[in-house]
Image (cartoon, helix red, strand yellow):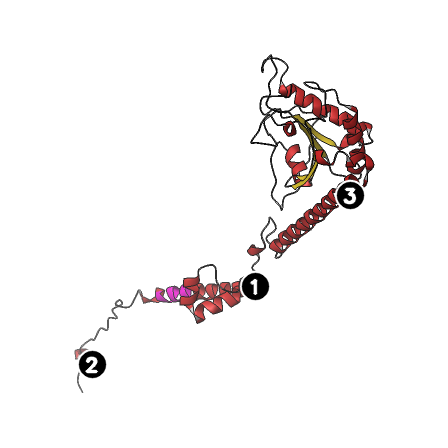
Amino acid sequence: MADESQRPIVVKKIKKGGHGHHGGAWKIAYADFVTAMMAFFLLMWLLGSASAGTLNGIAEYFKTPLKVALSGGSGAGDATSLVKGGGNDLTKQAGQVNKAGARKEEIMQKQQEQQKLTQLQQKIQENIDHSEVLKQYKNQLKLEMTPEGLKIQIVDEQNRPMFDSGSSRMLPHTRVLLQQLASDLNQMSNKLSISGHTDAKPFAGGQGGYSNWELSADRANTARRELIAGGLGENKILRVVGLASANPLVKSDVFSPENRRITIVVLNKEAETSILNDGFKPQMNQEVIGGPPAENAQGASAQAEQK
């Protein structure tokens, strides 16, 4: 039997290494998984909160992407998008419908006002044709519908002037005429604009002293006082101006007697608002801006007069 002490001694050594760092790879995979889940739930939330129109637009894009790309815009069928409602409140969906309704209502109001002015024109014309007082002044009264409203012009005739020559003193027949008109004008709630006009014959003193500007403004104010004496409400006068010979009725003859006239305009609401706001005209969908009435403004616009 061999001696046990002679057996070789075997020492086993375990070497560590080679694969010692692979244990962190699972963290990267887990992070990718969590990111994918977050993206998935975010997608689900967006699809759940999107409107039907937006979903239809997205579906249409994936069906025919080239068609949507060529047609432009944010996609088909997005008319119910919250943002499309407009206004400060993004939850509104009928903003444009409200604007269209306001526009339609404003147009209807203008048409009703135009109809009332037309009826007033017809009534005054009938009074002129049938009244024994007004019939004799038929050739001196001119009625015309304008963008500002109903324009009534009382013009001079060669042998029948409205005022004394070179003066604002009104002749008796002109007083009768204006007082007859006052009752008809008072039936409308619309404001009035009164302007005086002269021919182009200047005063001897020229423009430095009393001129056609002062004369036309004085005659317009005299007409205003006579209308009030005939029963017209004082608050119905919005503007009184003198335009001298700046706007002749007979442009081919600035010395024609017809250029000497008093013009009364029954103003529509748009023209009234424009005057109150110094010529500014608001948009159709804006609210009408009011202001204090203009009092007896003596306007200006040219040079001349009747002698």
Specify the segment rendered in magenta: 25-32
Residue 113 as seen in the image, left or right of residue 78: right
Q: Earlier in the sequence, mark 2 or mark 3?
A: 2
Task: Give SS at disc 2.
Answer: helix
Q: Residues within 10 Å of mark 2 (few under 14, many from 20)?
A: few
Examine the rendered structure and indicate whether residue 243 appears above or below residue 107: above
Quadrant in which the C terminus is drawn:
top right
Image location (x, y in percent) of residue 258: 65, 30
Q: Is residue 32 above or below residue 132?
A: below
Circle on res. 126: 3
Give percent across and percent down for residue 99: 63, 51
First in sequence, mark 1 or 3: give its number.
1
Badge 3 crowding class, 10 Å Cα cut-off, few under 14, some 14 to 19, many 20 or more, is few
Secondary structure under tag 3 reads helix
Residue on which disc 2 sits: 4
Q: Quadrant of the N terminus?
A: bottom left
